Image (cartoon, rainbow, N blue to C red):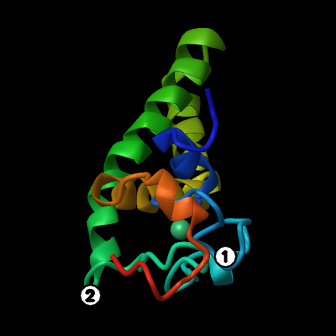
Amino acid sequence: MLQKGNKLYSILTGSCPKCHSESMYKDPNPYKIGKLFDMHEKCSVCGTRYKIEPSFFYGAMYVSYAVGIAFAVAAFVISNLILGASLMNTFIAIVSTLIVFMPIIIRLSRNIWINFFIHYTPEAAKSRNPDSKEL
Ligand SMILES: [Zn+2]
């Protein structure tokens, strides 16, 4: 299921949304907090610019709200419904989940956001000339 050509592949791996050939991020590890937002300007394989317009990734904040809710609901289900924690402990579990997973939530949101606008193009993966294929 998780292979190149699938949007989930780009979203979960943070790879270029157009060719799925390389990571959009300078450091693939989101827990290096100082480099959390460091992205390449464009894909070295297909030449896609990641920042489609100025402040493009501000829109990812809307997505991060939804992704954050998903993580919070998961934390609620696991701690309260499955483990039977008290309401106070459930609250603590939700807050710590959101803090611990924040780098992942931020990156996931950016990946989902850019995948709304740029779609996988198999031909782009074959092109090796960064300047021939501008967005
Ligand atoms: Zn690419």
Residue 9 appears left or right of 134: right
Q: Do the residues under discs 2 and 1 have CB atoms within 8 angstroms?
A: no
Determine whether the beta carbon of the residue marked 2 sits less than 8 angstroms from the nearest atom of ligand 1.
no
| Sequence-first disc among 2 and 1 | 1
Determine which residue is flagged by label 1.
Answer: 33
Give the number of marks: 2
Label 2 – label 1 distance at C-alpha? 23 Å
Against 77, is 71 above or below? below
The N terminus is located in which quarter?
top right
Label 2 belongs to which residue?
A: 54
The residue closer to the viewer here, 106 or 74, is 106
Q: Residue at x 65, y 66 (%)?
A: 22
Amino acid at the residue labelled 2: Pro
Q: Secondary structure at mark 2?
A: loop
Indicate the position of residue 4 as horizontal and vertical percent values. 60, 44
Question: x%, y% of residue 70?
Answer: 43, 35
Q: How far across and down, in percent of the image, does residue 125 sit?
A: 57, 61
Q: What residue is rendered at 49% in x and 63% in y?
A: 124
Q: Which mark is residue 73?
A: none
| 99 horizontally vs 30: left or right | left
Q: Is residue 16 visible?
A: no
Q: Mark 2: give few (<14), some (14-19) or many (20+) Cα within 10 Å.
A: few
Residue 115, image quadrant: bottom left
Q: For mark 1, does the 10 Å Cα neighbourhood hold few (<14), some (14 to 19), or many (20 or more) residues?
A: few
Where the C terminus falls, by quadrant?
Answer: bottom left
> Residue 66: image x %, image y %?
33, 44
Answer yes or no: is residue 72 visible.
yes
Q: Residue at x 74, y 65 (%)?
A: 29
Kind of residue at badge 1: Ile
**Secondary element at image label 1:** helix
Disc nearest the viewer among 2 and 1? 2
Q: Nearer the viewer, residue 77 or 114?
A: 114
